[in-house]
Image (spheres, rainbow, N blue to C red):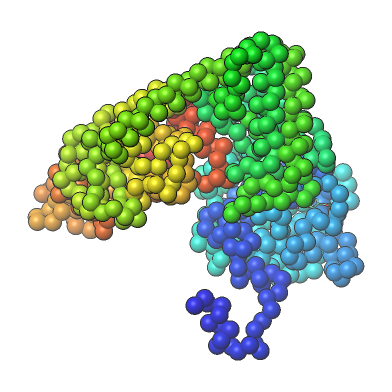
Amino acid sequence: MSEEVKNNQEYGADQIQILEGLEAVRKRPGMYIGSTSARGLHHLVYEIVDNAVDEALAGYCTHIEVIIEEDNSITVKDDGRGIPVGMNHKAGKSALEVVFTVLHAGGKFGGGGYKVSGGLHGVGASVVNALSTWLTVEVCREGKVYSQSYKRGHTDEPVKEIGTCNPEDHGTKVHFLPDPKIFEETVFDYDTLKQRLRETAFLTKGLKITLKDTREDSHHNHVFHYAGGIKEFVQYLNRGKEPLYEEVIYCEGNKENVYVEVALQHNDSFNDSTYSFVNNIITPEGGTHLAGFRNALTKTFNAYARANKILKDSDPALTGDDIREGLTAIISIKIEEPQFEGQTKQKLGNSEARGAVDSVVSEKLTYFLEQNPEIAKNICEKSLLAQRAREAARKARDLTRRKSALEGTSLPGKLADCSDKDPKNCEIFIVEGDSAGGSAKTARSRATQAILPLRGKILNVEKARLDRIYGNAEIKAMITAFGTGIHDDFDISKLRYDKIIIMTDADVDGAHIATLMLTFLYRFMPELIKQGHVYLATPPLYKIEKNKGVWYAYSDEELNNILVEIGRDQNNKIQRYKGLGEMDAEQLWETTMDPERRILKRVEYDEEYASEIDVTFTTLMGDKVEPRREFIEANAKYVKNLDI
Ligand code: 1YM
């Protein structure tokens, strides 16, 4: 029985309170900000920033500053008009107070323009206020500075004039501390804010966003300011790749009250990295705007290729997949009343968006191709190569399918499968190397644990074309073992194991192999990661023996703790594990495989940060050395235990 129903029975029907105003937000925070985990915590910042971004889109704000203060409170400052402080007669209080204390007030009563506020769609400042221990807002307007403070959403003092400012200055400053009674996590992560704010800056051409961390031991700061907007976003996404041509193709236009912006550039990879946004909010499941874009792209390139005899009359048309091979694209539209559909409300439903994007892209792209025949030819030829490779891959796949039809559902020879046939109970360990694979086969619990040893490094799918990928023995083994198929054939209901556990050595090579496997899963079976089926095993780094006791440590910190606990004696025997191969079957079971004792790390995929995850994979696995070196240097602090 739910908590709420229980309470109602206890108090009786008469006592049922109608949840009012901000109390409702504190009672059900998840309904307003999604969750009270780290994700929800960071959403508070985006809600406030989004109000400032709206002010930028209205043309009044050029700079937004975000500061993580020493006590993990947040300051957001803009140079917009300043929230109006005058009396709102309908509410009987200052407009400023209404914005922060009345649910759904938002910027709606300004009227005009787009109400963009991202996050959970514009519930805004009052929600942040309700979920903060305290919040203070300062407004600078017409030479005066006004301020008001609140505690847990309740007004602490009336709006008051606290000083003067230069009459030319104007803006709004919000300072708040998230309430630890609400949030499970109250420490802000710099990189999480950095990624989102960078994306916001790309999507809002010309807007400068600065981020500063003033906490002890973490003095970072970044400035994001892109005159080229989404054109620069595409360049950023292609940073680790080799672009096919220099210029980013850009289409912009206004149709049926939809403002459309599209930027695209092909690179020499084989993936489609297209991201779509509506009012600055990412739409991970696409929708009508994405459909309009795809239609325009396929139509325009086929028409060009036919007209210019790159495709002969007898040749089959290029498919959308052919044209989108190696494409990086951003579709960003602004629309007055977005409707979101689908289970997770992440898919745009407005039908006018389809036509608007289709028409703007068709028109602008046709013109661009006519003006740039070199680039046009280049893209058409890459698409033709993709068409041929896809044909070869289809043949290879059909061959494998036919073979498996003849030989029955032939599981890979190296797979030691489990006996339980209910996937919910089953897990598969993908193990680096035949020798560790051998120990794992001895160690495992046969009923529920399957072992698939892979020999050496698997193919880097970031650098290989489909036909080669389908032909690779290690990859084929994984695909057949999982049972789901890949790409268009992918069917998660056929997954044979609930957990896919990558088990590699705890050293640099092991980390590299794990990354190669994750790259494959991310590019070919992303749903497995999104739905939480992919895990990393954590083998111990040390074995400590004293008298008859044995301890395992999974980090240097843990080793120290154990040594403090048992005493640092001469006779302590400390063994540093170099790899899985050094453990016998029993040790491997005890430390890494036994569901009762092991540590598993689930691989997370937050769609909100999809474009950044994409960049990380290309940076780590792509051709270019320089971006990779920069990335590793920038992230070196996270890899303390590198064993080089
Ligand atoms: C650091 C957060 O909230 N800036 C901000 C908010 C508003 C305005 C300017 C604003 C809007 C309008 C007119 C309008 C808001 N005003 C309202 C409301 N930064 C931040 N900057 N004048 C100023 O929309 O017409 C809500 S948000 F409702 F009071 F107009």
Judge left or right: residue 7 versus residue 15: left
Query: Residue 59 location in percent, x, y?
Result: 83, 41
Query: Residue 348 location in percent, x, y?
Result: 68, 46
Nearest the eye: 23 or 629: 23
The residue lying at 76 percent from left, 66 percent from top is 102
Residue 282 visible, this orientation: no
Judge left or right: residue 279 versus residue 579: right
* Quarter that holds the C terminus: top left
Query: Residue 39 location in percent, x, y?
Result: 55, 53
Query: Residue 611 location in percent, x, y?
Result: 57, 37
The residue lying at 74 percent from left, 35 percent from top is 357
The residue lying at 45 percent from left, 26 percent from top is 394
Judge left or right: residue 512 versus residue 75: left
Nearest the eye: 624 or 404: 404
Please identify the quarter of the rendering in which residue 633 is found: top left
Nearest the eye: 419 or 251: 419
Nearest the eye: 359 or 157: 359
Please identify the quarter of the rendering in which residue 120 is found: bottom right
Q: Is 485 situated above or below 158?
A: above
Residue 293 visible, this orientation: yes
Counting every numbered tag in the picture gives 0
Please identify the quarter of the rendering in which residue 179 is found: bottom right
Judge left or right: residue 315 versus residue 113: left
Q: Is 581 situated above or below 159?
A: above
The residue lying at 63 percent from left, 55 percent from top is 44
